């Protein structure tokens, strides 16, 4: 982005960006605009998710969901946002009011800072930070601080229970989550999000590849790289669910046990911040999973060189193509997150802990060792890797998906029902 | 778990706990993973399959695939009540059965024979009704029934009272033909639907107190017999007028109103109405429904005083105290006369059981409702005349009057009434 700004300055003001006095001001304005756009992207996205989740949840429960505000009820989230902001902002008299007011901002900052490194397409990303993955894991820890603060400052036992549960859960699941991300890191050898996606491009034409080997084909994705990566995808996904307090790990907000957990006492805008973050987190975790395991914005059959060197109209076209590939993959993962919530009951605290420490952590460590050996053994043989990737994507991707779809439609048929997408 | 084990008999203490996770070590560990994967596989496919099915939600009220929802409800749905007064015997069994008194029936009796001749009121406060159906069960003819109507949002509170006998009319008593078991009824729902149709019409005024027996002094003789309050208000009104103090005049008028700001008068609130009266824009004293006859009387007194310029005379005490039941005296006399007549007839028919039975039946309400425990009035009177039933209190529709008559008749026969 700095390069683009420098070019902009020299073209518009005919000065040398490196020495011009106003360069920093232009930078600041650009940064402000980008930050504004990203924060709003997060907020609007979370709003839209709240609508999508309600519609999807409704269908899964044979209901319809909100369908009155705007076409298909799409503007429901907007109406809700207006309602939430107009509500009275209550601060309990017995609370620690400064911390109480601060907590939502910690959560909000922890969430929106992830957009600094989250990629969207081949060229659209706020930065290409070298330590991207590490940065995300670090910055999201701020959310725990916010949650703990809110629970403590509310001076309510339900809030405190919720916060404690959230802290225990998030801290525990950081371990398998972080470990699972080590595997794509070992495969691609970089912590940068953009680089990680670039490494999932398969055998490029320059290296003797062709249409079927280059670009975002499933056999180039990290998830189908080898069995350990496949397992780690699920470990990461589970851990991310738990870190985001999403069902079935929503113990911190278990309304049947502790009212609403850490945000029990919040109302109005402050409350909506917590909610916004919860839904926004779904995008963030899906985007990370998509980046690390599902080939990110790679377009099947399009080599990196083609993307890098495109100019004019074709560059815009390719950019949009890669953007849509990324968005579609991420949204599918978001759908899975929502789908999981309406499938699984909330698990017990002790089961949650035993799942983490007895199953996910050992599995994640075993995967890392397996992966290290694998990389040492096969990294020099791209053609073997390609061959194995094809086998994996058929055996672990296509076949299970097909069986699952068949099972789903059998479920419909066996109950004497039929596929019917009317009554929206 | 802890307490349970503590109190358990000794031999059970050694029993292994159910669901011990580590029983088989590695095998269980692998089993758990397999079980989790399998249940995910199954559970997720079930929820996903619902994604592709038609939601069962019926989008009431505006996107219904069928016509009216009420018509699709089960036949025995307990919706609004409906009374077909063409087959109502005015037995009031429903009124007595209602646990929350939301039915009120105004029966009319022949002043001489004290027989039921009709009803001038059959109101069900559907706003209070809890749809328990207890009123439907005792009805001898099926006149009162639940319909399937249920949409009870009404612009006016008073419209929530269903008046099955229109104001000012009298519905005759239905005489059950002997031995009949089925009764022709208007199509279920048609009567109630007609009432509900009028729900959005302007509401009827609040029922004023004592409208049935207009004995209130103020309403009958306003200027001559004003209540103390009316007189005081009139004096204040005259004073205000003398000073042309319209705001004060308005205040005085407002004092005579109920002060609920309900808007029933057609103005926005009490201020609107009183202001109009004070400025001479309105001359109708009868618009304040919540204030009832009293408010109407006082306003009338004030308006008359303003018109004539004279304060009303001191109240005539007797009139104020006169809500003595206009009907009461003749009623008592009539009742006495009736009782005497019945007793005389009883004594005359003493030796003829059939004639005696007929006399007893004459004393009963005659609704054939069966509330007495017999099939109908015929049964009860036969029981008294021929089978030695000495309980005069069984005819609920006849009330205490019938009981008294029957008791007197029994006494005249030398028998001992049980109550
Ligand atoms: S349904 Fe029940 S509550 Fe309603 S009027 Fe009948 S007896 Fe009374
Ligand atoms: S016949 Fe008796 S029970 Fe039936 S509606 Fe009339 S008064 Fe009520
Ligand atoms: S005598 Fe019996 S059947 Fe006749 S009105 Fe009285 S209670 Fe009903």
Image (cartoon, coloured by chain):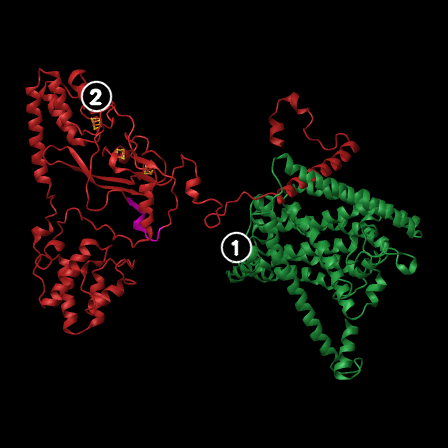
Chain colours: A green, B red
Residue at horizontal 71 percent and vertical 75 percent from the top = A28
- Quick check: B358 above or below B134? above
User: B220 left or right of A237?
Assistant: left
Q: Evaluate whether residue A144 shows in this view.
A: no
Query: Observer-nearest residue: A400 or A301?
Result: A301
Q: Is mark 1 within 8 Å of ligand 1?
A: no
- Nearer the observer, B292 or B94: B94
Tell me if the residue at label 2 has its CB under 8 Å from ligand 3.
yes
Q: Which residue is mark 1?
A: A68
Classed neighbour count for the residue bearing mark 1: other residues with Cα under 10 Å, few (<14), some (14–19), many (≥20) = few
What's the mark number on residue B379? 2
User: What distance separates the C-alpha of mark 2 from that of mark 1?
Assistant: 63 Å
Range of residues picked out in magenta: B154-162
Placement of the N terminus of chain A among the 4 image quadrants:
bottom right
Nearest to the observer: residue B65 or residue B20: B65
Which quadrant of the frame does ligand 2 lie within? top left
Taking the image as drawn, is residue B121 in sight?
yes
Secondary structure at numbered mark 2: helix
């Amino acid at each position: 982005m700095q390069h683009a700004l420098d070019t902009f300055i020299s073209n518009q003001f005919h000065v040398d960006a490196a020495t011009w006095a106003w360069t920093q001001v232009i930078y600041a304005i650009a940064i402000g605009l980008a930050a504004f756009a990203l924060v709003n992207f997060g907020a609007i996205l979370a709003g839209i998710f709240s609508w999508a989740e309600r519609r999807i949840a409704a269908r899964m429960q044979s209901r319809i969901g909100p369908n009155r505000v705007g076409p298909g009820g799409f503007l429901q989230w907007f109406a809700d946002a207006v309602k939430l902001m107009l509500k009275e902002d209550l601060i309990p008299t017995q609370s620690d009011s400064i911390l109480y007011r601060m907590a939502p901002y910690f959560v909000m900052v922890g969430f929106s800072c992830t957009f600094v490194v989250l990629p969207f397409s081949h060229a659209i990303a706020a930065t290409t930070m070298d330590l991207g993955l590490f940065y995300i894991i670090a910055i999201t820890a701020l959310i725990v601080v916010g949650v703990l603060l809110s629970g403590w400052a509310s001076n309510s036992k339900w809030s405190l229970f919720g916060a404690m549960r959230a802290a225990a859960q998030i801290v525990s699941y950081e371990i398998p989550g972080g470990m699972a991300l080590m595997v794509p890191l070992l495969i691609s050898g970089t912590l940068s999000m953009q680089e990680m996606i670039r490494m999932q491009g398969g055998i490029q034409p320059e290296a003797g590849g062709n249409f079927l080997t280059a670009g975002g084909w499933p056999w180039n994705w990290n998830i189908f790289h080898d069995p350990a990566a496949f397992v780690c995808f699920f470990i990461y996904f589970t851990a991310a669910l738990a870190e985001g307090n999403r069902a079935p790990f929503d113990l911190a907000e278990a309304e049947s046990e502790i009212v609403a957990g850490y945000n029990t006492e919040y109302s109005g805008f402050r409350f909506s911040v917590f909610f916004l973050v919860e839904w926004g987190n779904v995008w963030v975790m899906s985007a990370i999973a998509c980046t690390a395991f599902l080939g990110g914005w790679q377009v099947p059959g399009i080599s990196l060189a083609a993307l890098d060197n495109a100019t004019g109209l074709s560059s815009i076209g390719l950019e949009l193509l890669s953007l849509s590939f990324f968005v579609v993959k991420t949204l599918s993962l978001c759908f899975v997150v929502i789908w999981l919530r309406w499938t699984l009951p909330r698990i017990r605290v002790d089961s949650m802990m035993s799942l983490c420490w007895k199953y996910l952590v050992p599995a994640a460590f075993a995967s890392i060792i397996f992966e290290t050996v694998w990389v040492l053994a096969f990294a020099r043989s791209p053609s073997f890797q390609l061959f194995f990737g094809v086998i994996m994507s058929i055996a672990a991707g296509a076949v299970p998906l097909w069986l699952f779809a068949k099972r789903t439609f059998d479920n419909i048929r066996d109950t004497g029902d039929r596929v019917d997408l009317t009554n929206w | 778990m802890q307490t349970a084990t503590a109190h358990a008999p000794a031999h059970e203490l050694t029993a292994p706990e159910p669901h011990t996770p580590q029983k088989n070590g590695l095998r269980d560990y692998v089993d758990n993973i397999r079980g989790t994967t399998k249940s995910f596989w199954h559970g997720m496919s079930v929820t996903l399959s619902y994604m592709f099915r038609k939601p069962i939600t019926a989008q009431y009220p505006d996107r219904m695939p069928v016509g009216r929802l009420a018509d699709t409800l089960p036949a025995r749905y307990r919706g609004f009540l409906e009374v077909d007064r063409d087959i109502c015997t005015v037995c009031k069994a429903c009124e007595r059965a209602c646990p929350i008194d939301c039915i009120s029936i105004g029966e009319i009796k022949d002043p001489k024979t004290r027989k039921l001749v009709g009803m001038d009121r059959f109101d069900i406060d559907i706003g209070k009704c809890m749809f328990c159906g207890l009123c439907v069960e005792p009805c001898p003819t099926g006149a009162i029934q639940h319909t399937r109507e249920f949409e009870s949002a009404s612009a006016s509170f008073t419209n929530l009272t269903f008046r099955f006998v229109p104001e000012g009319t009298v519905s005759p008593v239905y005489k059950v033909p002997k031995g009949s078991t089925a009764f022709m009824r208007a199509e279920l729902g048609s009567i109630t639907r007609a009432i509900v149709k009028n729900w959005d019409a302007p509401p009827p005024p609040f029922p004023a107190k004592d409208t049935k027996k207009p004995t209130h002094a103020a309403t009958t003789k306003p200027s001559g017999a004003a209540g103390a309050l009316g007189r005081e208000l009139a004096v204040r009104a005259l004073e205000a007028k003398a000073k042309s103090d319209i705001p004060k005049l308005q205040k005085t008028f407002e004092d005579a109103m109920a002060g609920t700001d309900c808007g029933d008068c057609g103005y926005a609130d009490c201020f609107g109405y009183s202001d109009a009266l004070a400025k001479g824009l309105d001359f109708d004293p009868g618009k304040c429904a919540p204030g009832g006859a009293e408010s109407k009387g006082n306003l009338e007194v004030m308006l008359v005083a303003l018109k004539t310029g004279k304060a009303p005379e001191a109240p005539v005490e007797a009139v104020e105290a006169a809500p003595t039941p206009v009907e009461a005296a003749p009623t008592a006399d009539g009742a006495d006369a009736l009782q005497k007549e019945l007793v005389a007839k009883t004594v005359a028919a003493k030796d003829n059981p059939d004639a005696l039975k007929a006399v007893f039946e004459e004393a009963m309400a005659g609704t054939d409702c069966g509330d007495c425990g017999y099939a109908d009035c015929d049964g009860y009177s036969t029981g008294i005349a021929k089978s030695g039933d000495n309980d005069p209190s069984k005819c609920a529709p006849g009330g205490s009057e019938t009981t008294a008559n029957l008791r007197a008749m029994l006494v005249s026969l030398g028998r001992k009434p049980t109550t």
